[in-house]
Image (tube, helix red, strand yellow):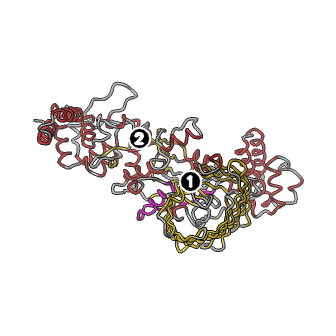
């Protein structure tokens, strides 16, 4: 009797013992198990060596081993005891039930290794298409090359030869101001080549996981991204293209974390990456995203890593980088690659107003490289001006899209620079004091006590992600705020606990005016919040948005002004709504690395629906006890719906 038949009969006996009197249930379960178990390989009966390998795999419990579970991306299912692969592409599985059945997938995979060579030229043999599984099972079961012939895999060999791998580097492009999607950051892997050095690392290949979104935007883009409506695939492409995309086009700094992997671990990762070519996962913005599945790749490279296990609800790229760095000795070196904007701003800082004007004139073609205006500069100064002019011209080209004019200007500046013998050029951009992985964690719990409208209260506030303006900027982009799903519950003395606030989205982008331009600063938030209306505090649906300008005075001061619009919805309001507009002003001051202060004021006139004027003047400060704990104190005086009251709150913030 073959093992699979034995297993089937065993399950019949269990079913009979459980449901002796329920014929309908018994029949349904019988059909289910027959359907489920019908995939078991029939080859075993005809191939003694396959039967021997299958038996050995069962005795060694290989399907339960962590390596197999990681190769197939199995995770615990919703039902107790169930298991389910996160891969959603059927071709990834050899068994019809492989997505939920590790044992079935293993045995069917073994059987497929015995298949003859395919006749179609574009079809790979199973040993090549699933080369990571083949190599692992070969190692575990010690395949006999005489009884199981190993097939050549020329396509994989050519691919590997082109990559010429020697190491893996985790790449983290930081946030991009004014782009909410980029404020989470992004991660990808660079496949470092043999003999690569600092100058040639741009020529390496990158392994990227991303969603195929087509031309969707707006609500459709957000909805599909939140609920897994896009397929996510791995791709291999030249690293310089990704650097150009992030550093030159989007002006995002790039951090490179060189990983400490052995040659075998690098090859194990790449074998699995080969298996994933053309294989898709349902892409979710918050959890199964670009960074999450890179962690799953690293888990296949080094058995024993459990990087994905801590990201059950969301996987923010900076948090995944922290998880990698936290592995003892896993990161060998860290390099910083500044964006084009950072290089440009760093160069302009030392020039003074006259030099900045000259650079802008060179970049726009108002002054040519052989103009008399440049004759008063030394050769070294002229080299700096021409290099900055070239960078500025490219920066303008990226923003405007006027490629023809800007390209001609860039070529002329480069040609003039090449005529100068001096080797001096732009000063290197200093590496930031804190890396992204050294910033605060993104989840936060806050416990607070305070007094509002003459009543004492206690409050708990939970923020799953990610960063606000008062948080420490170490490792984050200054002036960028993005909070998701903030939830606050409050209890006034003598009353029960009530939902005080739920703000799913709260984004602020304060991009300061500089020599490079006048970027627009903006904000948007919506959700539910309590406001005092007719001596009650109903939960109103709220929307607030604004746009304006931000000015910076050194690294410690940001001052902003935004023209804002507010909308409140509730059945207690006249006509059920209140719509208004007005001005908001604010300043952020870093008094010391630990102490930060924000002063703000807003006056909005609501002229439609429930008419009233809202004024809010607030002063808030944060003091960092350490990287994981802050104290905050907030005072505000508010006039809303013809009612004035005061607010005072002391809170303890715990980042985790």
Q: Residue at position x 65%, y 55% from top?
A: 509
| Region rendered in magenta | 316-338
Query: Which dot marks residue 528?
Result: 1
Q: Is residue 240 visible?
A: yes
Image location (x, y in percent) of residue 412: 78, 45
Above or below, 117 against 156 in this view is above
Q: Residue at position x 77%, y 48% from top?
A: 413
SS at circle 2: loop
> As drawn, which residue projects farthest toward the left?
1
Above or below, 340 against 633 in this view is above
Q: Residue at position x 31%, y 48% from top?
A: 69
Reply yes or no: does residue 100 show up in magenta: no
Closest to the observer: 489 or 424? 489
Q: Is residue 12 left or right of residue 586?
A: left
Query: Where does label 2 land, which residue?
Result: 276
Q: Is residue 425 visible?
A: no
Q: Is residue 474 left or right of residue 51?
A: right
Query: Quarter of the image containing the N terminus?
Result: top left
Image location (x, y in percent) of residue 332: 47, 62
Q: Residues within 10 Å of mark 2 (few under 14, many from 20)?
A: many
Reply yes or no: does residue 318 show up in magenta: yes
Image location (x, y in percent) of residue 237: 52, 42
Q: Earlier in the sequence, mark 2 or mark 1?
A: 2
């Amino acid at each position: 009797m073959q093992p699979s038949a034995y297993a089937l009969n065993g399950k019949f006996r269990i079913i009979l013992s459980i449901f002796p009197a329920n014929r309908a249930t018994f029949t349904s379960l019988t059909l289910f198990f027959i359907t489920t178990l019908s995939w078991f390989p029939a080859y075993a009966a005809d191939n003694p060596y396959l039967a021997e390998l299958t038996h050995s795999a069962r005795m060694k419990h290989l399907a339960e081993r962590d390596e197999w579970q990681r190769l197939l991306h199995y995770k615990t299912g919703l039902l107790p005891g169930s298991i389910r692969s996160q891969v959603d592409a059927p071709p990834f599985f050899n068994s019809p039930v492989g997505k939920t059945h590790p044992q079935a997938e293993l045995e069917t995979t073994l059987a497929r290794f015995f298949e003859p060579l395919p006749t179609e030229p574009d079809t790979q043999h199973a040993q090549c298409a699933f080369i990571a599984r083949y190599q692992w099972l070969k190692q575990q079961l010690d395949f006999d090359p005489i009884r199981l012939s190993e097939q050549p895999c020329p396509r994989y060999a050519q691919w590997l030869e082109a990559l010429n791998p020697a190491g893996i580097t985790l790449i983290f492009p930081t946030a991009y101001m004014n782009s909410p999607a980029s404020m989470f950051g992004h991660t990808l892997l660079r496949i470092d080549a043999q003999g690569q050095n600092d100058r040639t690392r741009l020529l390496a290949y990158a392994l990227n996981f991303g969603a195929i979104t087509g031309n969707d935007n707006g609500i459709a883009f957000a909805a599909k991204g939140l609920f897994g409506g896009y397929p996510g695939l791995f791709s291999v492409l030249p690293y310089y293209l990704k650097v150009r995309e992030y550093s030159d086009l989007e002006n995002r700094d790039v951090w490179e974390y060189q990983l400490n992997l052995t040659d075998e671990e690098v090859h194990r990762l790449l074998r699995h990456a080969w298996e994933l070519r053309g294989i898709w996962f349902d892409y979710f913005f918050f959890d199964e995203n670009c960074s999450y599945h890179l962690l799953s790749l690293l888990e296949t490279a080094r058995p024993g890593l459990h990087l994905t296990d801590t990201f059950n609800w969301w996987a923010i790229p900076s948090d995944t980088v922290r998880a990698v760095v936290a592995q003892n000795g896993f990161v060998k070196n860290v390099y910083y690659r500044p964006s084009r904007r950072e290089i440009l701003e760093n160069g302009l800082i030392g020039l003074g107003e006259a030099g900045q004007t000259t650079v802008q004139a060179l970049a726009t073609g108002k002054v040519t490289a052989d103009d008399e205006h440049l004759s008063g500069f030394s050769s070294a100064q002229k080299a700096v001006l021409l290099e900055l002019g070239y960078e500025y011209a490219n920066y303008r080209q990226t923003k405007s899209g006027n490629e023809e004019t800007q390209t001609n200007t860039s070529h002329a500046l480069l040609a003039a620079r090449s005529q100068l013998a001096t080797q001096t050029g732009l000063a290197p951009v200093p590496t930031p004091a804190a890396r992204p992985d050294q910033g605060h964690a993104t989840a936060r719990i806050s416990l607070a006590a305070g007094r509002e409208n003459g009543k004492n209260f206690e409050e708990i506030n939970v923020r799953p992600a990610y960063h606000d303006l008062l948080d420490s900027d170490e490792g984050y982009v200054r002036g960028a705020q993005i909070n998701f799903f903030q939830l606050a519950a409050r209890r006034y003395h003598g009353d029960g606990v009530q939902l005080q606030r739920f703000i799913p989205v709260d984004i602020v982008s304060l991009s300061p005016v500089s020599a490079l331009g006048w970027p627009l600063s903006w904000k948007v938030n919506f959700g539910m919040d309590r406001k005092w209306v007719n001596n009650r505090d109903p939960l109103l649906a709220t929307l607030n948005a604004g746009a304006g300008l931000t000015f910076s005075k050194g690294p410690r001061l940001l001052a902003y002004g935004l023209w804002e619009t507010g909308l409140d919805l509730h059945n207690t309001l006249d006509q059920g709504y209140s719509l208004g507009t007005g001005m908001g002003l604010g300043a952020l001051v870093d008094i010391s690395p630990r102490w930060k202060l924000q002063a703000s004021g807003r006056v909005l006139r609501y002229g439609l629906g429930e008419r009233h004027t809202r004024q809010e003047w607030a002063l808030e400060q944060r003091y960092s006890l350490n990287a994981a704990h802050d104290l905050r104190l907030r005072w505000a005086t508010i006039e809303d719906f013809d009612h004035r009251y005061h607010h005072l709150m002391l809170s303890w913030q715990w980042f985790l």
